[in-house]
Image: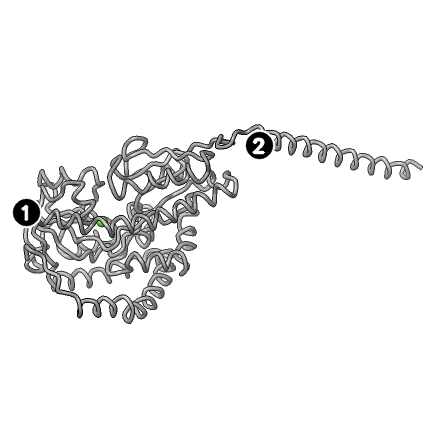
C-alpha cells in the first residue's frame, strides 16, 4: 500500500520542481526582456573590460598600432560590451613576459611575436617566421586554409592560451649594419639583434645573435653593444630612428620573409565570453591581421624613398655567398629543431608540405606575373647603388 502511494507523490514532486524551474526561468526571461526594453539605444548591456599587453613600445606605428586598431574594432563591433585597454611594453609586464601574463590571466590578451617564446615553446618560431620560408600571403593561406592555425592552437593549449594571427609585415629587410658586408667572411664576430630561428642561423654563420626588444635596439646600436640589427622594414625602422645609428641597409629579409605577429587570448577568459563576443574577437583579429599588411605595403615604399633621399642610408643586397651560408645553416637549424621537439616536427611537416604546393603554383602566378610586368615596365633603379 505504501509503495503504491509513493509513485504519485514522486510524480507530483517532479512536476512541482519542473514548474518552479520553468517559472523561475520565465521570470528571468522576463527580467532580461525588461532590461533590453529599458536599455537606451547605444547603451552598453554588460561591460567587460580586458587588458591587452604588448611587446611594443606604446604608440609605435605599424606593429604597435595593430593592437590599438584591434581594440577600437572590438569596442565598435560590440557596441561597448567588450572594451580592450592596450598597454605598451613595460606598463603592466616587461615585453618578453607577455605570453606568461596571458597564460596566467594577468592580462586577458597579448600582442607580440610567437618566436619571442622560443625558449619555452621551440615550435613557436613557425608562427612568426622561418628563414627562407613562406611569404605573408602564403602564411595566411597556410594558417586559415592549410591547417596551420589548428596546429598553433594545439601548440599553445597546454598553456591555456588561444592564438590568432595578429598582422604581418610582409617581406622584411635583412637589417642595418654599421659596416659593409663584402662576403660571408664579414659575418665573423658580428653582433646582431636577430631573434628566432634566424638568430641560431646567424650564430652558426659566424656572428653572435642577441635578443632585444624594440625599445632597446636604438641605444644598443648607438653605444656599440651590437653591430647590426634587424627590426622590420623601412616604415617601422624609420620610426625607431635606425638610420641614425647605422649606414648600411641590407635586403632581402631572408630570415623573415612574411613575419607574422600574434594575438594571444587567455582561454578561460575567451570561454567566458558569450558566443557573439567570441566571434567579434576573432573577426577583429582577422581584420587587423590583414590591415597591417595593407599598411606596410602602402608605407614601406614611402619610407624607403625618405631614407634614400633625406638620410645617408646606403641600400645594399646581401652578397650571394652570404645567402648561401645562411641557407645551409638554416636547413641545419630547422633539422635540429625537428629532431629535438615532436611538435616542431609535426608543424614542420604541415608547413613544408604547404610551402612546396604553394611555391609550385606561385611559380606560374606571382613570379611569372612579376617577371611579365618587369619585361614591359621601365626598369627600377635606386639612386645610391
Ligand atoms: Ca624582424
Residue most extreme to the right: 1
Q: Residue at x 25, y 36 (%)?
A: 57
| Residue indicated by mark 2 | 36
In the image, is residue 361 above or below residue 78?
below
Relative to 9, 336 lies left or right: left
Look at the image and tell me in which quarter the N terminus lies.
Answer: top right
Query: Residue 235: x percent and y percent?
Result: 20, 46
Give the class, few, some or many, for how many residues have Cα within 10 Å of label 2's Cα (few <14, many ≥20): few
- Residue 166: x and y in percent read 34, 47
**376 and 305: which is toward the camera:** 376
Image quadrant holding the C terminus, namely: bottom left
Residue that badge 1 annotates = 312
Toward which corner of the image does residue 89 lie, by quadrant? top left
Q: Position of residue 78 (x, y in %)?
A: 46, 38
Dot 1 falls on a residue whose secondary structure is loop
Tally of marks: 2
**Camera-side residue of 184 and 277:** 277
Amino acid at each position: 500500500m505504501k509503495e503504491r502511494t509513493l509513485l504519485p507523490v514522486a510524480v507530483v514532486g517532479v512536476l512541482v520542481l519542473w514548474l518552479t524551474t520553468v517559472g523561475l526561468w520565465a521570470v528571468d526571461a522576463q527580467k532580461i526582456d525588461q532590461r533590453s526594453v529599458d536599455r537606451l539605444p547605444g547603451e552598453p548591456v554588460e561591460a567587460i573590460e580586458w587588458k591587452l599587453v604588448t611587446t611594443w613600445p606604446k604608440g609605435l606605428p605599424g606593429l604597435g598600432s595593430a593592437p590599438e586598431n584591434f581594440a577600437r574594432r572590438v569596442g565598435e563591433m560590440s557596441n561597448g560590451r567588450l572594451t580592450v585597454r592596450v598597454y605598451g611594453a613595460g606598463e603592466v609586464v616587461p615585453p618578453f613576459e607577455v605570453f606568461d601574463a596571458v597564460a596566467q590571466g594577468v592580462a586577458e590578451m597579448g600582442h607580440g611575436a610567437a618566436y619571442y617564446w622560443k625558449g619555452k615553446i621551440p615550435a613557436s618560431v613557425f608562427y612568426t617566421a622561418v628563414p627562407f620560408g613562406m611569404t605573408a600571403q602564403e602564411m595566411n593561406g597556410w594558417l586559415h586554409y592549410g591547417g596551420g592555425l589548428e596546429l598553433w592552437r594545439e601548440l599553445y593549449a597546454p598553456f591555456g592560451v588561444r592564438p590568432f594571427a595578429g598582422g604581418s609585415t610582409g617581406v622584411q629587410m635583412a637589417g642595418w649594419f654599421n659596416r659593409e658586408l663584402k662576403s660571408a667572411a664579414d659575418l665573423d664576430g658580428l653582433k646582431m639583434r636577430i631573434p628566432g630561428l634566424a638568430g641560431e642561423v646567424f650564430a652558426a654563420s659566424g656572428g653572435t645573435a642577441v635578443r632585444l626588444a624594440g625599445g632597446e635596439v636604438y641605444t644598443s646600436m648607438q653605444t656599440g653593444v651590437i653591430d647590426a640589427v634587424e627590426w622590420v622594414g623601412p616604415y617601422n625602422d624609420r620610426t625607431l630612428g635606425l638610420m641614425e645609428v647605422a649606414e648600411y641597409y641590407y635586403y632581402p629579409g631572408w630570415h623573415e620573409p612574411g613575419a607574422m605577429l600574434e594575438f594571444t587570448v587567455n582561454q578561460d577568459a575567451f570561454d567566458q565570453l558569450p558566443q557573439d563576443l567570441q566571434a567579434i574577437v576573432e573577426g577583429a583579429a582577422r581584420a587587423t591581421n590583414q590591415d597591417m599588411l595593407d599598411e606596410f605595403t602602402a608605407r614601406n615604399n614611402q619610407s624607403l624613398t625618405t631614407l634614400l633621399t633625406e638620410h645617408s642610408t646606403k641600400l645594399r643586397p646581401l652578397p650571394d655567398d652570404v645567402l648561401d651560408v645562411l641557407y645551409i645553416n638554416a636547413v641545419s637549424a630547422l633539422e635540429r629543431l625537428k629532431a629535438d621537439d615532436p611538435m616542431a616536427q609535426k608543424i614542420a611537416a604541415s608547413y613544408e608540405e604547404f610551402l612546396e604546393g604553394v611555391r609550385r603554383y606561385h611559380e606560374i602566378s606571382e613570379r611569372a606575373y612579376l617577371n611579365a610586368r618587369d619585361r614591359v615596365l621601365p626598369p627600377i633603379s635606386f639612386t645610391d647603388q
